């Protein structure tokens, strides 16, 4: 069972599809948000100042956790309609304003997004999506000016992949391994972003 770990919606249960998605394990999510909270404290950013983007959203657990902790806006993008229905149910279960679900191919949706930039991005694609495709999506975020100067991007990959999913020009802030899952924390070069 997947639940919201902290914040206004703490303890709320999230629906998980029987198949077709691989939700981030609770222990990995807990570690991710612990590291994220420490990073935000270090750089002096409050949760309420954040706008988050959850790519390949699956169940929406990462984006909805950010919403529960105070992010004022969360955009969740998912390609699979069945997963989108689950995310919609989870948005309703969390019952907090500020969540928006967009159904479609991640790259195509990002091309037309034109939203204010995001300070936090979760990238958790199916493991069969290769690092080159993820790198292309990250470059698209940068090219379309969808990241703030301080934006933190967190990419979840299988540990067995071994390749960095971050573009060469990006700064790798941290790499955390959790068994068969690795989290990459990175930032785009500042001069390519918006303040």
Image (spheres, rainbow, N blue to C red):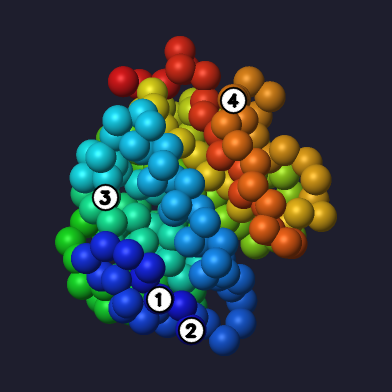
User: How would you rate the neighbour count of disc 3 (Cα within 10 Å): few for under 14, some for 14-19, many for 20 or more?
Assistant: many
Which image quadrant for residue 48?
A: top left
Earlier residue among tags 1 and 4: 1
Q: Position of residue 45 (x, y in %)?
A: 29, 34
* Residue that numbered label 2 is attached to: 1
* Residue that numbered label 3 is attached to: 71
Residue projecting furthest to the left: 97
Q: Position of residue 190 (x, y in %)?
A: 46, 17
- SS for dot 2: loop
Tell me if label 2 and label 4 are in contact, CB under 8 Å: no
Look at 80% across and 50% down and name the residue there. Answer: 161
Q: Quadrant of the C terminus?
A: top left
- Label 3 and label 4: CA atoms lie apart by 24 Å
Tell me if label 1 and label 2 are in contact, CB under 8 Å: yes
Look at 68% across and 24% down and name the residue there. Answer: 168
Report the disc number at residue 3: 1
Earlier residue among tags 3 and 4: 3
* Residue that numbered label 4 is attached to: 171
Q: Position of residue 98 (x, y in %)?
A: 21, 56
- Label 2 and label 3: CA atoms lie apart by 24 Å
Residue projecting furthest to the bottom: 18
């Amino acid at each position: 069972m997947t639940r919201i770990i902290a914040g206004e919606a703490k303890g709320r249960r999230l629906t998980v599809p029987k198949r077709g998605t691989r939700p981030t394990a609770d222990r990995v999510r807990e570690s991710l948000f612990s590291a994220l909270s420490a990073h935000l404290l270090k750089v002096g950013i409050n949760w309420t100042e954040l706008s988050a983007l959850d790519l390949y959203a699956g169940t929406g657990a990462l984006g909805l956790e950010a919403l529960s902790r105070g992010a004022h806006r969360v955009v969740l993008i998912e390609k699979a309609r069945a997963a989108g229905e689950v995310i919609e149910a989870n948005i309703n279960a969390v019952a907090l304003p500020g969540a928006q679900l967009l159904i479609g191919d991640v790259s195509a949706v990002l091309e037309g997004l034109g939203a204010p930039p995001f300070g936090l991005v979760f990238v958790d694609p199916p493991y069969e999506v290769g690092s080159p495709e993820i790198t292309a999506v990250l470059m698209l975020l940068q090219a379309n000016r969808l990241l703030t100067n301080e934006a933190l991007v967190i990419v979840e990959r299988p540990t067995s992949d071994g390749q960095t999913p971050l573009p060469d020009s990006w700064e790798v802030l941290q790499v955390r391994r959790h068994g068969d899952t690795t989290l990459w924390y990175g930032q785009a070069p500042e001069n390519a972003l918006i303040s």
